[in-house]
């Protein structure tokens, strides 16, 4: 539920639809002071050697893993995540983040020497040194409330930043549990947690953080990016999508059906990278659909398939299905809410008109439409016919052909014979194109967004003046012309040398 007058979050257990108590919000008036405390902690933190920061990350990783069972329990209680999924997608994936970043961080934070032409720039060194931005404002969604914040917090801290973390109003208890883990393993105030809804998120931006990293809906991203831009604060936005799977006729059908069923239905379809549209070679369309419907129908609601997060999400998903059916789509399995709470069964549809919301907007539920294509160009056109572009998966035994096809899809991540799973990785870049957002998490490209590249110049020259300083005499022009002639491909080198030397002598005389 949204915040009530900014004071308290009323929580609902999505498995039953019953009240799960309330949690106080961080008062808006306290947010600026919290940001200042993080800023002060960050200054001390970045003065510590990288090895100390690395050791602190190992302590954080140990504290995190020691709370593995608590994390899984809270994920179940708060957003209904099945235990197996909570362990694999939140605990195991997150446990790999610290080792991955420790492996990369020295190289990524190393100063980069700028190669200089010693004739034009004698006795000088120029380096680009990555340095911390300051305070990173992290505004997060509820669907992976543990891994998503940590995939940014770990590299942000290693780079010397402090973080102000605003978990979703739908997963504040996961946020509070992470805050306990930070308190047990990190210097005070290095990661500050702000509990609440959009108002608290806006207050974090307003308080003057140095960068905003937002993961959430397209609508939220537009507001956050505009707000940050109005304060000249840079932002990165990881948003939703409508990802396509393309099934070629030579695929390994068993693996393809199992993989796409998981891609479409894990986390009850509430994954930014869920398979939300399937395009299948017409020659195997009917067989594929029959097998997918069997796989979807076998999923056990409550065990394999958790609930949707709240009543609003359930209504939105069902409205998309209802609209598609009203326009002529056929539901082959699922299609109606089940049980108590906010459960929706795995649902497969065919004959969904392309203009339906189910084909164009993010569904964020366990629902997937299937359509046929006749040739690869048509498959590419269908997959690219979307405002979004996070991932694509292409399924075929011909890996080269599938890779070439995937490369034609306008998106940030492409998979051949797999889907979705690289988002939590420290080493792989994750980020969308088009309305799926901008920026990256994971890899050196994520780190580049968490540092400022400071250029540092040191001049050891004993000369009184540089050649380009005053006075601007004719000798200066002669010397510069000579240098250009020497460097120019096909230039008259002897003439150039003569001009450069005579210009130089002229400068010396001055
Ligand atoms: P949301 O946009 O409703 O909220 C996300 C966060 O932003 C919450 O903490 C919310 O309180 C805050 N917020 C919302 N409006 C704000 C505003 N105007 N100012 C400041 N803060 C604001 O999204 P959600 O429902 O929590 O998450 C689901 C969405 O996230 C889906 O669209 C999903 O695809 C996307 N997502 C993307 C990725 C990715 O890596 N691309 C990963 C996970 C989820």
Image (tube, rainbow, N blue to C red):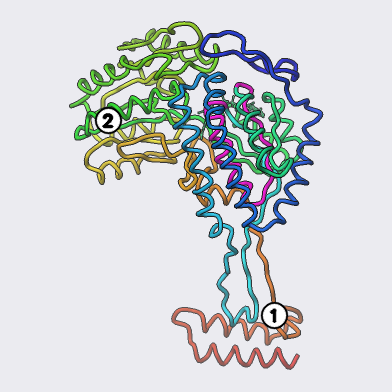
In-image side of 472 versus 301 (left or right)? right
Q: Does residue 464 appear to the left or right of 476 in the view shown?
A: right
In this picture, residue 206 sits left or right of residue 10: right
* Closer-to-camera residue (391/464): 391
Q: Which residues are magenta?
A: 142-170
- The foreground one among 152 and 241 is 152
Name the disc covering residue 88, or none: none
x and y percentages locating residue 479 in the rendered image? 62, 85
What is the crowding at mark 1: few (fewer than 14 residues within 10 Å), some, or many (at least 20)?
Answer: few
> Which residue occupies 61% across, 51% down?
55
**Towards the viewer: 319 or 260:** 260
Look at discs 1 and 2 and give the one toward the viewer. Answer: 2
Q: Earlier in the sequence, mark 1 or mark 2?
A: 2
Q: Residues within 10 Å of mark 2 (few under 14, many from 20)?
A: many
Residue with the most extreme front position: 66
* Res 226 → quadrant: top right
Evaluate if marks 1 and 2 touch, with contact meaning CB atoms under 8 Å apart.
Answer: no
Q: Secondary structure at mark 1?
A: loop
Q: Quadrant of the N terminus?
A: top right
Q: Which residue occupies the foreground of this view, 245 or 324?
A: 245
Please say whether residue 362 is one of the residues in the magenta stretch: no
Residue receiving disc 1: 460
Instruction: Give the residue at mark 2.
Output: 256
Q: Residue 163 lies in magenta, yes or no?
A: yes
């Amino acid at each position: 539920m949204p915040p009530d007058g900014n004071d308290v979050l009323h929580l609902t257990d999505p498995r039953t639809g019953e009240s799960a108590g309330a949690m106080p919000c961080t008062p808006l008036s306290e947010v600026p002071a919290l940001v200042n405390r993080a800023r002060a902690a960050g200054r001390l933190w970045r003065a510590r050697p990288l090895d100390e920061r690395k050791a602190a990350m190992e302590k954080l990783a140990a504290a995190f893993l020691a709370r593995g069972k608590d994390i899984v329990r809270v994920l179940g209680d708060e957003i209904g995540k099945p235990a197996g999924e909570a362990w694999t997608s939140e605990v195991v994936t997150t446990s790999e983040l610290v080792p991955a970043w420790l492996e990369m961080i020295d190289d990524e934070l190393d100063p980069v020497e700028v190669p200089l032409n010693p004739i034009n720039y004698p006795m000088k060194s120029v380096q680009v040194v990555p340095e911390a931005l300051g305070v990173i404002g992290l505004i997060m969604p509820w669907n992976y409330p543990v891994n998503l914040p940590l995939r940014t917090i770990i590299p942000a801290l290693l780079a010397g930043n402090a973080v102000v973390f605003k978990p979703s109003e739908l997963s504040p208890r996961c946020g509070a549990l992470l805050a306990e883990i930070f308190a047990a393993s990190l210097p005070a105030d290095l990661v500050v947690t702000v509990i609440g809804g959009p108002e608290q998120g806006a207050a974090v931006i307003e308080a003057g953080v140095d960068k905003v990293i937002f993961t959430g809906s397209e609508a939220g991203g537009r507001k956050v990016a505009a707000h940050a831009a109005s304060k000249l604060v840079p932002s990165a936005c990881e948003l939703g999508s409508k990802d396509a799977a393309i099934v070629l006729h030579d695929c390994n059908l068993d693996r393809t059906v199992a993989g796409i069923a998981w891609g479409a239905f894990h986390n009850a379809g509430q994954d930014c990278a869920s398979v939300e549209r399937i395009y299948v070679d017409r020659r195997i369309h009917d067989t594929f659909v029959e097998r997918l419907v069997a796989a979807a129908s076998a999923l056990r609601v409550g065990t394999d398939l958790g609930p949707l997060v709240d009543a609003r999400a359930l209504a939105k998903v069902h409205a998309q299905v209802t609209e598609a059916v009203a326009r002529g789509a056929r539901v082959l399995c699922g299609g109606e809410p089940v049980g108590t709470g906010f459960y929706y069964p795995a649902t497969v549809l065919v004959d969904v008109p392309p203009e339906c919301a189910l084909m164009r907007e993010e569904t964020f539920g366990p629902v997937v439409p299937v359509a046929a294509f006749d040739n690869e160009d048509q498959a590419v056109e269908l997959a690219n016919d979307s405002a979004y572009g996070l991932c694509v998966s292409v399924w075929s035994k011909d890996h080269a052909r599938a890779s070439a096809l995937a490369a034609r899809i306008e998106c940030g991540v492409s998979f051949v014979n797999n889907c979705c799973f690289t988002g939590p990785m420290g080493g792989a870049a994750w980020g969308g194109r088009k309305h799926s957002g901008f920026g990256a998490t994971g890899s050196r490209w994520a780190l580049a967004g968490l540092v400022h590249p400071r250029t540092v110049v040191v001049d050891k020259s004993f000369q009184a003046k540089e050649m380009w300083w005053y006075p601007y005499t004719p000798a200066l022009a002669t010397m510069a012309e000579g240098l250009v002639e020497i460097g120019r491909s096909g230039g008259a080198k002897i003439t150039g040398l003569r001009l450069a030397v005579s210009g130089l002598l002229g400068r010396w005389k001055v």
